[in-house]
Amino acid sequence: MSVVLQAVLSGLLTGGVYAMVSVGLTLIFGVMRIINFAHGDFVMLGMYAAVGLGVAAGLDPYVSVAVVGPGFFVLGMGVHALVIRPLVRRGAPHTTQALATLGLSVVIVSAVLLTASGRSVIATTGLTTAVVHVEGLVLSVTRLLAFAIALVATGLLYLFLNHTYAGMAIRATAQDRKAAVLLGLPTERADMVAFGLGIACAAIAGAVMVPFFYVNPFVGQPLGLVAYIVVVLGGMGSMVGALVGGLAIGVTEALSGYLLDPGLKELVYLLLFVAALILMPSGLFGVRGAERMAE
Amino acid sequence: MQMRGVGRRLAVAGLLAAWVGTGGAVAQTPIRIGAVLQLTGDLAWYGQEIGRGYELGAKYVNAHGGIGGRLIELMRVDVPSPTAALAEIGRLQEAGVKIVIGTGSSAVALAATPAVERNGMLWWESNALDNGITARRLKHVFQFAPNNDSFSDASVALFETLAPQMLGKALKDISVGLIYENSAYGTSQSKAQKARLEALGVKLVSDQSYDRKSSDLSPVVLQLREAAPDVLIETGYQDDIVLFWRQAKELGYLPKIAISSGAAATQDFANALGRGGVDGIIGYNYPFHEMSEAGAPGAASYAAVYQAAYGNPPPSGHPLAGYAAMLALADVMRAAGGDDPDAVAKAAHAMDKPLGSYPNGAGMKFTEWGRNERAPVSGFQWQHGKMVTIWPASVANGKAMGPLVPWDKR
Amino acid sequence: MLPPGWPWAGGLLAVLTATPFLVHDSFVLHALLITCLWAGLASAWNILAGFAGQLSFGHAAFLGVGAYTMGILDTTLGVSPWLGMVAGGVVAAALAVAIGVPSFRLRGPYFALATLALAEVVRIVAVYWDGLTGGSSGLLMPIETGLAAVSWAGKGPFLWLTTGYLGVVWLAAAGLRRSRLGYFLAAVREDQEAAAVAGVDPTWAKMQAAMLSAFFTGVGGAILACYLTLVEPDSFLGVQVSTQFLVITIVGGLGTLSGPVIGAFVATPLAEFLRSVIGSEIAGSLHQLIYGISFILVMIFLPRGIAPHLLRGRGLVLLSSKKVVP
């Protein structure tokens, strides 16, 4: 029994990482309704940034978050201005915007491959493989810290969205774009800030993974896919949904990996995802009917 | 673009020839050999390393008389996928290339070899392992590299030789756990391993595959912790093997003996697990350059040249496999008098060189359909943070130690 | 009534048919035949995505299922690849029904992600069920030569085969557009609720489009397997294969008849050229970088693809009329 509990615990910690990656994505998805194919790759860039800061300035990955977060916020806004905004201004369909992010993903991965080579960077900090024992169960310190930071970031984002003017403008744009325009809200700037915040979250997720996970140009892709599943499962635009969804996927994965076969764990959560969509088309915490306005 | 490359390389080759004093006053036309490599995609690192092996091998051959005085000129092509293989083989053919050396991906090799055969060219396999490469009855395909069977045979041989003596138990009383990543590499290895282990009458108490891109392997560790096999045999790539061992350490899991696939054969692996982390882990892979000179002539000088050219010692056995394959190919081409595929195939089949003829310890003796019976796999063990070759005896430069010391006692 | 653009289509097909007699460069023939194959595949995808408005992000599942069906029938039962192709198409169509039933109630990005997830499921099953599919190593097609084996030493016959394939799919798509089903699909795509009120059964219409689309995709997958002489999960069921359908069709022009063909003839040779000339000679990933940047630029400057610019005013251009609010 305690082994099952251990699996659940490990799954929760992994789920925390998924949630961290997904929180940014749900914001972008919720506001702009575009599938950002490059989201996972920004996680990867955040990893490289943390590694780079560690090498150049001796910064511990957790400390580097203070630099990576704001840095990628600005970078995200820049990417939006350069790639996304021109598309929106020209009236490009959502599919075109999504495909532009696909091109962006290719650009990011090949640029990193060109400069850094495909060889994985495996960082080791003082905390790698450190554990905390609780009631006979084992908690990986690095994953626990990643989980904690995910919670903090989600909390901060939630506060921002609900208690600042900018945040509420973003939420309004997400909820009903036409109405927001009619109300005179700066929807374009809301887009840009939302995108920047989303990218910053992704990069922070990457940075906190560095102590326990390897870094190479391709690690972003599977993480991006899981993030999509989490976002849709949790409900587009819902912070809580991203958190709960991430944890749910993490636990499902770990349990099915342990009880069935590790080779099938992705399969199980994919099937559950589709089943959930059939029963709750707008996701766990989504606004019912929002999926019809998703076009 | 191609003409510029040829001109430049001809000039260099000419200078080299003049310096070494071969070829007399007239620079003969170089022989172009196609090099099929994964230069993009997630095998890019392996492609780069294997490519380095080819380059160094070609340089060595050119500095030692070339092929009947003609110098080798490598034409590298990027083949990240089977579809690209068909494109690039076509391009090589148009460029007049007749002999192709490759590659780091079995899927690419499997797609490329029929195309090579049909285009009247010849394929010289240096690294890819799939048994299927020599199973399709193609007359101009040669697998100088070991294949899946020899890899898995090595792992089981290591098990057979070391486990009973380290554990003080008979084979039938030893329990084994098998884990493997689920792409072609892991699954084909594990299948062969399972068959051999079954034949030995060993108890298989755990059998798990996993996706190597996963960010969490704790389910695998937990199952193993429950099943508690004496010996763990794992097949994976470097990244997932590192992740596995880190999570094993966190969750307090340790087998008595660990036999790990070639992924464990890199310095990065050792660095990732920290000082005590790696000691005692046994691995099997393409031979690493740290071998006895008697069994692997030229390995040390190869390593020195690599270091000089690229600024670090060879990080794994992949480039050495490419280097040795290039040397062997040159020998065969010399015997054939050039690059005519039929003559080269004939010369290859006529070759009979014992183990220990090449810097990776290989010999050369091909079966009817092109498999090299003398393609070695070596077993090594991490001892005090260094890789020591422990098997086979002809190339060993150290003795095996074991079983693994518990985590908290390191 | 002849489909719009038919002189161009006919001319292209004629040129392609004549090419093997005039061109013998193996690389050029390869690039052309892969381009034709993808033009056909993208046209098939367009039936569901462009005509019916359901953007599938998991079409690799149909490609792979078609290829595996033919491969399994050939390697275990010795069934002719020609029959195997058709069988592959049929099995893919059946899969489309299985995927459509849960998915068609979903819209927009939800539908897209459901198809993506289900395609991944198919891939994982193919990897896991290695007794049937050969697992990650895949299936090796027997190396025979001749019409019966759908396998030739030269690339010319493959070019004819893929040209024929493209022709068939294009004619089917052209015919579909002018048929009752085609108009139903357009109605459903533009406004599903209104179409339902007008008496169209949206789910059945989408299902028919999905079956047709999947059938042709499956056949195309089988053809690819014959050409590569192997079927394996990454090349046939990977996510990057699914995105290829999108990229080509949207660059060319979603919903148009010529769009997928134009997209294929632009994107595929460009990718091959970049990889071969720049990739191998200079630096490894530079070609991908250039491809990615070009792609972004095309999306920015031609957001609806190339075809609408070429077809302005000529012929019936069916496009999604959904405007984007700033």
Image (cartoon, coloured by chain):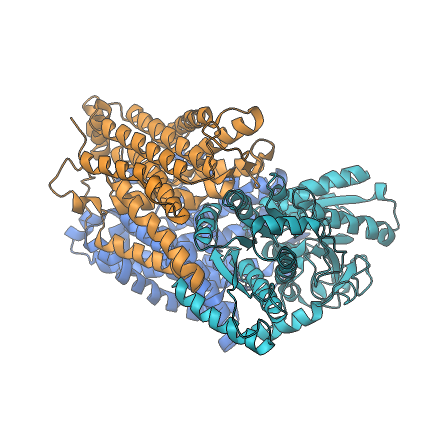
Residue found at the very far front of the displayed protein: B25
Q: Quadrant of residue A195?
A: bottom left
Spot occupied by residue C73 in the image (x, y as percentages of width and height): 52, 26
Query: Which chain is orange in the rendering?
Result: C
Asked if residue C13 is positioned above or below residue B378 in the image, the reply reads above
At a point 29% along the width and 48% down the height, the residue shown is C266
Q: Can residue B16 be seen by looking at this rendering?
A: yes
Q: Chain B in the picture: what colour?
A: cyan
Q: Which residue shows up at 20% across the image and 58% down it?
A: A186
Q: Is residue A46 left or right of residue C183?
A: right
- Indicate the quadrant containing the N terminus of chain B: top left, top right, bottom left or bottom right: bottom left
Q: Position of residue C120 (x, y in %)?
A: 47, 40
Can residue A273 be seen in the rendering of this structure?
no
In which quarter of the view is residue C48 placed? Answer: top left
Taking A264 as reference, is C278 left or right?
left
Q: Colour of chain A?
A: blue
Q: Residue furthest top?
A: C199
> Foreground residue, A276 or B164?
B164
Q: Say left or right for B17 vs C28.
A: right
Residue C58 position (above or below residue A200) = above
Q: Position of residue C80 (x, y in %)?
A: 49, 25
Q: Dividing the image into 4 quarters, which one contains the C terminus of chain B?
A: bottom right
Q: Nearer the viewer, residue B19 or B68?
A: B68
Of residues B368 and C273, the one drawn nearer to the viewer in this rendering: B368
State the residue at coordinates (88%, 45%). Answer: B170
